[in-house]
Amino acid sequence: MRERFDELKEKVRALPYEPGVYIMKNRAGGVIYVGKAKALKNRVSQYFQSDARHSPKTRKMIAQIWDFDIIVTESEFEALVLENSMIKKYKPKYNILLKDDKGYPYIKVTTSKPYPAFSIVSKPQADADRYFGPYPSRRAAGRAIDTICETLKLKTCRRVFPRDIGKERPCLNQHLGRCIAPCTGNVPPEEYAALVSEAIALLEGDYKRLTRTLEARMLEASEQMQFERAALLRDRMRAVEALGEKQKVVAGSFADLDALAFVQGQTKGCVVVLHYLGGALQDKEYTLIDGAAREDVGEVLGAFLKQYYSLRKVVPKVVLLSDSIEDMPAVAEFLSAIAGCKVELAVPQRGKRHDLTRLAAKNASEEIARMETGQERRLKSLELLQGMIGLDRPPEILESYDISNFAGADTVGSMVVFENAQPKRSRYRRFQIACAADGQNDYAAMAEMLTRRLQRWKDGDEKFCPLPDVFLIDGGLGHVRTAQGVLDAFGVTTPCFGMVKDDHHRTRGLVAPDGREFGISTMPAVFALIGRIQEETHRFAITYNRSLGAKRMRGSTLDKIPGVGDKRRGELLRHFKTIDAIKHASVEELRRVTPLNTAYAIYDFFHGKEDGQESSAARERKIRCE
């Protein structure tokens, strides 16, 4: 690896002092990081200088770099756009990544129809209808629709008008006063369209103008002595005022200012976005960030900013940040290109704008405090475990193993991984043990499983990398010594401990290969963690064992019977449900599913001959033939 590192340093010397994008790759050719640079040579060379300058995350990434590529661009702005595009394409492991699978929904208003309806869509279309958004979630968009329709008494049913006018009785919403019931035919399209126009004004956040309009119409109706109509307009005006004051509708869709802040906690970071419209706070969004450090504030904010707004496709006129980011002018140009107008990007140091970013940071701290309550407990258990077994630092990755079999058959092994005291199910692995053919031998099975696991790691298989901080073996001293022998054979120095149980089958402690036992019953946090790991490892092993056993019973047992193929086997299992039920069925019961000769064959297979005599089914056949 050192030779390859020197080769990469030589490759850096030939890089140009031009803007562009660099792509870091691992040994398998996978993209692990994408970055942009004003001058490629200066930026890339920084990765191959002293480790002391790098954060832990960057050092970890550098250790996996096997090669890199570059793409030279005409400008820094072009490099930024290309970087953002390539991050979306490759989803590199060491870039800050936002999940975009949920998307940002929009509200669609079918203004092209006589009686417009509201719905939630994933993106606007090029048609005559109106679209509002994006909203932070489908729930937020649905809440906006419900609130507006309830306030203005618009329909929420799926009936299509005028097609369905008069076809059915009005629904319960009319009787509850929640809908003006266009289904009755008493609401002209013009009147309904006027209400929808008011709804659109609310979606645009202009509730004050709508309130003034309703007030003017109310006074006009009162002057004309239309008191009932005036009362209806008064009630609607009050509802709209309440709606605007509570800020329930806009939800950041048409914000004219966003305030962003990033705060790094003990285990996770959080970016909060506060949306403002007309100086009033409309909504809050937050995103939790893994793997960042306090010194990565600028990098996280910059990466988040570009991905967040490129996903939303909507940018306010002003974006305020709690901290500076690299290449502010280029990022501001990038946001302006998305918005279609000039966007101001600033880091306020004092005044009201600074108060907004401080509020965003406070909200981020609150989210971290709420989230880290459970995290702190888990971290404490790892710190206690570290002190108990004498590690240099809290173990981040714990890997646990168990062997399971049924009466010596279907022997399997399970590998369960916990990261930061939580199960990492994507890294679970299971093994079908080959040496089980020689008879039940848990030690040999454990040795085979660990040998296969470590060989995959040695071969560079990323599914088995990296090695854990501690190996945990379900079993006593014999099991852990067997495991230690395999580790020694591969030259692996990772600590290994057995998880031993008491007479009540509860985890009582950890045992080292040299025979030392560490009691955990007096440490509730460690006791709970190790017990959970052992239980999860056992569950994963036995689930795999049972699935193999069920597969064997379903397949091989019935397949041995003459006349029973895949189709007939399926019919038997659908009718009798289990192999045991088929085994205890009479010939007459079997005949309801299969032909008579097959029914006899199945019965004879399970019952056979007793004391040298023919089976009862065979005797019955002979009697019928005579």
Image: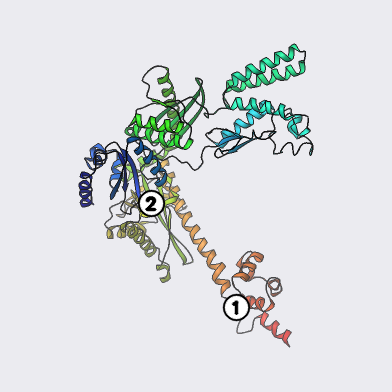
Q: Which mark is residue 232?
A: none
Rendered location of residue 531, percent (x, y): 44, 48
Q: Amino acid at mark 1?
A: Pro
The residue lying toward the viewer, choosing from 181 and 546, is: 181
Which quadrant of the structure image shows residue 246? top right
Whichever of labels 1 and 2 marks the residue nearer the N terminus, that label is 2
Residue corresponding to mark 2: 399
How many C-alpha atoms fall within 10 Å of the one at disc 2: few (<14), some, or many (≥20)?
many
Left or right, residue 556 beside residue 597: left
Q: Amino acid at mark 2?
A: Glu
Colour approach in the figure: rainbow
Mark 1 element type: loop
Which quadrant of the structure image shows residue 421? top left
Residue corresponding to mark 1: 562
Furthest residue in direction top, as rendered: 223
Rendered location of residue 437, percent (x, y): 42, 70
Q: Quadrant of the C terminus?
A: bottom right
Q: Residue at x 44, y 30 (%)?
A: 272
Left or right, residue 231 beside residue 363: right
Please tell me whether residue 372 is drawn above or below residue 63 in the rendered image.
above
Rendered location of residue 2, percent (x, y): 21, 50
